[in-house]
Image (tube, rainbow, N blue to C red):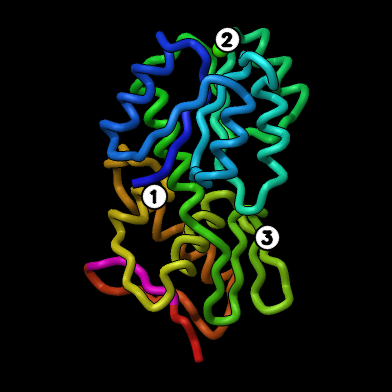
């Protein structure tokens, strides 16, 4: 369960949205203005904010800017009224994590929320001399920064964050590739091979036969 805040002044949109997110098992608060949103974020530290651009008073872009400076900062999914507004918002680069243009279906919105929450679950982690910072998307082996493809990075971040634990293949496929992945998992072995080569010796990623992989925390 995550703590969410829906910021939208139009009840016809916010009410079904809040209901859908509550059904997903989240604790959901609602604010109808930029000022109320900022007060709520300060008071409650939500994990994710669904933020409409068009709000009375302080608009969504300004709320996003102010929130982007906070530490810790919630993930922000911005709602825009039309695609022309989306272009404008992207041009201003206020620091949102994802965008959705109205009208959208609730299933698309809840899928985006799930993806953003998953991304936020992983804080910086370190094991076996390897350090991963998901927010900056950077990783180091000792002092040397690793050059990783996006999938290699996600895979390493997951394994390092769970160091010492055997992580199941299905879980890795689900988290790193796609929640609807059901094809062959040979691509996982290929990526593990590349990662092992980049990490060098001693080998830090152990194959756990019939289960998956374990990142060795080292001594
Ligand atoms: Ca609005």
Cα–Cα span, label 2 and label 1: 31 Å
Q: Which of the two labelled residues, at mark 2 and mark 1, occupies the earlier sequence position?
A: 2
User: Mark 3 = which residue?
Assistant: 147
Residue 13 pos. (x, y %): 42, 13
- Find numbered disc 1 in the image and state the secondary structure of the residue it sits on: helix
User: Mark 2 = which residue?
Assistant: 81
Looking at the rendered structure, which numbered label has been put on residue 175?
1
Instruction: Name the residue at 52% across, 20% down.
Output: 32
Residue numbers of the magenta segment: 211-215
**190 above or below 73?**
below
Q: Residue furthest bottom?
A: 219
Q: Is mark 3 within 8 Å of ligand 1?
A: no
Instruction: Name the residue at 40% across, 9% down.
Output: 12
Q: Nearer the viewer, mark 2 or mark 3?
A: 2
Camera-side residue of 200 and 50: 50
Give the main secondary structure, helix, strand or loop, of the magenta stretch: strand
Camera-side residue of 126 and 28: 28
Tell me the quarter of the picture where residue 14 sits.
top left
Q: Residue furthest left?
A: 210
Residue 100 pos. (x, y %): 53, 21
């Amino acid at each position: 369960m995550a703590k969410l805040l829906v910021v939208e002044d139009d009840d016809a949109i916010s009410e079904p949205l809040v209901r859908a997110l509550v059904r997903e098992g989240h604790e959901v608060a609602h604010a109808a203005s930029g000022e109320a949103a900022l007060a709520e974020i300060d008071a409650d530290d939500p994990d994710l904010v669904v933020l409409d651009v068009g709000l009375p008073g302080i608009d969504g872009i300004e709320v996003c800017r102010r929130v982007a400076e906070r530490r810790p900062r919630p993930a922000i999914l911005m709602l825009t009224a039309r695609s022309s507004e989306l272009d404008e918002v992207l041009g201003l680069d206020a620091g949102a994590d994802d965008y959705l243009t109205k009208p959208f279906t609730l299933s698309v919105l809840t899928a985006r929320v799930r993806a953003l929450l998953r991304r936020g679950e992983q804080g910086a982690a370190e094991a076996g001399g390897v350090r991963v910072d998901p927010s900056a998307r950077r990783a180091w082996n000792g002092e040397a920064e690793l050059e990783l493809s996006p999938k290699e990075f996600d895979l390493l971040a997951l394994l390092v964050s769970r160091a010492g634990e055997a992580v199941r293949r299905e879980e890795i496929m689900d988290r790193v590739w796609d929640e609807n992945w059901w094809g062959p998992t040979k691509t996982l072995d290929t990526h593990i091979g590349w990662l092992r080569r980049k990490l060098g010796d001693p080998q830090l990623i152990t194959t756990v036969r019939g289960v998956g992989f374990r990142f060795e925390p080292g001594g």
